[in-house]
Amino acid sequence: MEEALEVVDVVADSELEGAVTWLLRIVGLVLLLGGLGLWLLTEMGLLVLPALLIVAGLVLLVAPSILLALAELA
């Protein structure tokens, strides 16, 4: 966990903070839409793959804001 906060601190200090945040959010949105598409548009049901894609997408949508806020506080 310490290494992840160190990486976030380096990103927060650089001028690429906004670009990295939006890149992670776009990847999270794509994962979320892919998981919802697999779940709703196919006959898979809510199995492991769609559920993992949905959870990973939600984490990537929320995590950049939280990690950057924690890095600024530390």
Image: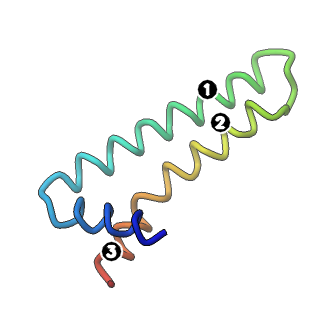
Q: Quadrant of residue 53?
A: top right
Which amino acid, by three-letter code, is at mark 1? Gly
Q: Earlier in the sequence, mark 2 or mark 1?
A: 1
When the figure is inspected, residue 3 is found, relative to residue 45, above or below; the finding is below
Which secondary structure lies at badge 1? Answer: helix
Which secondary structure lies at badge 2? Answer: helix
Q: Mark 3 points at which residue?
A: 71
Query: Could you tell me how far apart the alpha carbons at marks 2 and 1 are, in whole angstroms?
Result: 7 Å
Other residues around mark 3 within 10 Å, as few (<14) / some (14–19) / many (≥20): some
Question: What is the tally of numbered marks visible in this picture?
Answer: 3
In the image, 69 versus 11, the foreground residue is: 11
Which secondary structure lies at badge 3? Answer: helix
Which amino acid, by three-letter code, is at mark 3? Ala
- The C terminus: image quadrant: bottom left
Residue at the image position 57 percent from the left and 42 percent from the top: 57
Q: Name the residue under label 1.
A: 34
When the figure is inspected, residue 34 is found, relative to residue 68, above or below; the finding is above
Query: Could you tell me how far apart the alpha carbons at marks 2 and 3 are, in whole angstroms?
Result: 26 Å
When the figure is inspected, residue 5 is found, relative to residue 49, above or below; the finding is below
Q: Mark 2 points at which residue?
A: 53
Foreground mark, 1 or 3, reads 3
Q: Residue 5, how many percent across, how many down?
A: 38, 69
Residue at the image position 59 percent from the left and 36 percent from the top: 32
Q: Residue 15, how many percent across, how many down?
A: 12, 56
Q: Are marks 2 and 3 in contact (CB under 8 Å)?
A: no
Residue at the far left in the pictured view: 15
Q: Do the residues labelled 1 and 3 touch (CB within 8 Å)?
A: no
Q: Residue 18, how many percent across, how many down?
A: 23, 53
Which amino acid, by three-letter code, is at mark 2? Leu
Q: Do the residues labelled 2 and 1 touch (CB within 8 Å)?
A: yes
